[in-house]
Amino acid sequence: MQASQLVTKPSIALCICTHEGYEQKLREIQAGIEEEGVPYAVIPDEEQDVITLAYKGAGISQLGVGMGIGASGLCIHHHKLPADQPLFVSENTATCFEWRRFGYNAARLIKGIPFKDEQPVAVITEETELIQVVREIILKVLKETAQDHGEVKTWSKTL
């Protein structure tokens, strides 16, 4: 059966070259796409090059978006782009965050909304910053809870 026959519904075509550890990578990518509410189809392929895989996927996807998943990295391609000029390519995709972000961005390409950044929005590096963030969250929750009961209390003790 040809790959074009495998994709019958409008969806992102995830062309994957199976390799060691691909299951976890695929699971995170699928989760990112699902969280954005876009359908996808997984298409196994023998090709090793992720750019070629993604371009192939974009060509058979009715939505025009394909993703290449291989041992060497990830790629997102759109059918209107030249074969050698993908939208996103990453050869260093060793984290679950990266894998899920690629799923988000493939879905967001279809939805026409801004892409997710490369780094998480709030990265806390120092313990004092963490304490301050936790303190602010607790104060906000306490304030909102107190407003529901008709009184507002503020806490002045420093954590």
Image (cartoon, grey):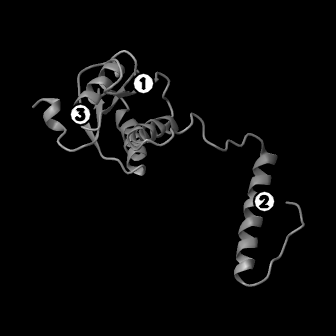
Residue with the most extreme top position: 84
Q: Amino acid at mark 1?
A: Gly
Q: CA distance from mark 1 to mark 2?
A: 39 Å
Mark 3: which secondary structure?
strand
Asked whether the beta carbons under mark 3 and mark 1 sit within 8 Å of each other, the answer is no
Using the image, determine if residue 82 lies above or below residue 96: above
Q: Amino acid at mark 3?
A: Ile
Q: CA distance from mark 3 to mark 2?
A: 47 Å
Q: Is residue 13 left or right of residue 151?
A: left
| Quadrant position of residue 153 | bottom right
Q: CA distance from mark 3 to mark 1?
A: 16 Å
What residue is pinned by disc 1? 73
Q: Residue at x 74, y 78 (%)?
A: 147
Q: Nearer the viewer, residue 35 or 130?
A: 35
* Position in image of residue 123 (x %, y %): 67, 41
Which of the marked residues, 1 or 2, is nearer the chain's N terminus? 1
What residue is pinned by disc 3? 43
Q: Residue at x 77, y 66 (%)?
A: 139
Q: Amino acid at mark 2?
A: Arg
* Position in image of residue 57 (x %, y %): 27, 29
Mark 1: which secondary structure?
strand
Q: Residue at x 71, y 68 (%)?
A: 141
Q: Residue at x 37, y 43 (%)?
A: 30
Which numbered marker is on residue 135?
2
Task: Tell me the quadrant of the picture where the C terminus can be found.
Answer: bottom right
Q: Nearer the viewer, residue 19 or 124?
A: 124
Task: Tell me the quadrant of the picture where the N terminus can be found.
Answer: top left
